[in-house]
Amino acid sequence: MKTSLDCIPCLFRQALDSARMFSRDPAVHEAILREVLDWCTGMDMSKPAPVMGQRIHRRLRRITGARDPYRKAKAAQNRLALRLLPELRSALASSEDRLGLAIRVAIAGNIIDMGAAGDVSLPGVRKSLMQALGGEVTGDCAAFRPALKKARSILYLADNAGEIVFDRLLIEELGPSRVTLAVRGSAVLNDALRADARAAGLHRLVRIVDNGSDAPGTLLAEAPPAFKSLFMKADLVLAKGQGNYETLSEAPRPVWFLFKAKCPVIAERAGVRLGAQVVARSKVRSADR
Amino acid sequence: MKTSLDCIPCLFRQALDSARMFSRDPAVHEAILREVLDWCTGMDMSKPAPVMGQRIHRRLRRITGARDPYRKAKAAQNRLALRLLPELRSALASSEDRLGLAIRVAIAGNIIDMGAAGDVSLPGVRKSLMQALGGEVTGDCAAFRPALKKARSILYLADNAGEIVFDRLLIEELGPSRVTLAVRGSAVLNDALRADARAAGLHRLVRIVDNGSDAPGTLLAEAPPAFKSLFMKADLVLAKGQGNYETLSEAPRPVWFLFKAKCPVIAERAGVRLGAQVVARSKVRSADR
């Protein structure tokens, strides 16, 4: 989906927040903000917002000299999610609808997002999870389950660290043998990398690939041919999070999205209320298929 | 006070909201946003944020061809405030501290602000007023009252339409004969003009001047000599609202400010919590006096 005008103030807000997280020097904060201003002036709004996010975070990493500035935060988020895993496993064990619950947990995990505003503390995440277990899931749930059942191969596109631990529960329900897990190619925000998949123990369950890119989403144009082939050939693609929705909602094949609608632009585009837990399927024009 | 980096995303948000209020054409929205981007790239951050607000709203008026696009909104805000006036008058009549209550009401009226986010519905304004009547006022209240008592001449700088109706109650308490009321020189946002002072009935009570400018604040550099002279010579200057605080907190004479801290940058600068009702006095270096 293209960048909305509403994304512009939000991109500045994110750039400023990130700059402050990694440098105490106000000159660095101003420098990055002025660069983002300059980029936005000539910005191609037909591209999705994560393209600008990618550029901003590349620049921040270059200025601050940190290759993966969110590394510690991601490790903490994984640990936090792992602490919640036992109680989620026992909830699943006693559930009459294990798959439904695992889907909810995977969506709820999407609150661990350092790009959008959110409470990523243990009580915050636990509270959100508990709400999610009882809360409504909006969208095309009825068609999602048979599609999952039918698929022999599933490409699962992870989103964030921490969240990926909750994805593990869904992947276990789906049956790991048919799942390939994709993470980002290199560091951006708290997006999950191979290290986070390993922290979640997923390397023992599924094949892990990366999308070859440092965008906070999945840019097919930047993906290596092997990834693109996997993406096109999988029976079902399941993509987590807003960044994947923004970059893949017009992909040349159907994609299923699981996310929490944390931003009004995405909520409007998906036709859901802000804060909704969403199962959505991309609409593909027949000419693209 | 100078423009903070945090003002940049907020200025974009405001420009976009205003553009949408006055035009349905997405091309107009994008055009104004791109212009603001361009201006901000070369922006002098040592100037207060209302200087950029002034520029944005000038441009919006030029693009949309509306000389005073908030005219109807202002008239509605004045009517709304006038509907609340009788109950406020009776609260004042039964109060043991009429001046204290009038100060609270004048500060509470500052929620009628279309630059900052706020609920300007009748229930919203009434609720805020009722909270204000019981709520705490932060700042230098102890010194404010004797300063008011001592002053033979008071220059009262109004802020917004609607709010100016509540200012009337404070002006009545102060004694209108020693008060001169200043409004903006021409239309910007819902800032009060002469027409709004008249709607509040203030033309029958006090002398009204204007500050000669279309900035959402008071830019002394743009004020006519007569205004500047009045500003420098009044025994006491009382300035309402955040825009006046941003543009006059470093003025070459002491200024008393009454406002609701609706923005985190201003709250931090004033040393108060976000949402606080503030009485503050500018600090003037002796060399400036």
Image: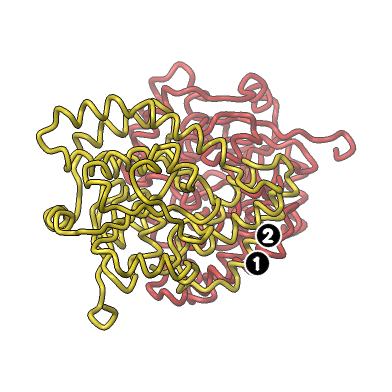
Chain colours: A yellow, B red
Which amino acid type is shown beneath numbered disc 1? Answer: Asp
Q: Nearer the viewer, residue B259 or A250?
A: A250
Residue B280 image point, x, y percent: 64, 31
Tell me if I can see residue B243 in this picture. Answer: no
Residue sitting at x 34%, y 52%: A240
Q: Which numbered circle lies on residue A34?
A: 2
Point out the residue furthest to the bottom here. Answer: A287
Q: Position of residue A245 (x, y in %)?
A: 35, 59
* Residue A62 left/right relative to B176: right
Chain for mark 1?
Answer: A
Task: Decide if residue A108 is on the left or right side of residue A66.
Answer: left
Q: Chain of mark 2?
A: A
Q: Mark 2: which amino acid?
A: Arg
Question: Which image quarter is the C terminus of chain A in?
Answer: bottom left
Q: Is residue A268 above or below residue A172?
A: below
Determine the image quadrant of residue B289: top right
Residue under label 1? A38
Q: Are marks 1 and 2 in contact (CB under 8 Å)?
A: yes
What is the crowding at mark 2: few (fewer than 14 residues within 10 Å), some, or many (at least 20)? some
Percent x, y for residue A160? 43, 46
In the picture as drawn, the residue positioned furthest to the right comes out as B287
Q: Which mark is residue A138?
A: none
Q: Dot 2: what SS?
A: helix
Seen at 9% across and 34% down, the residue is A96
Residue nearest the observer in this picture, B74 or A143: A143
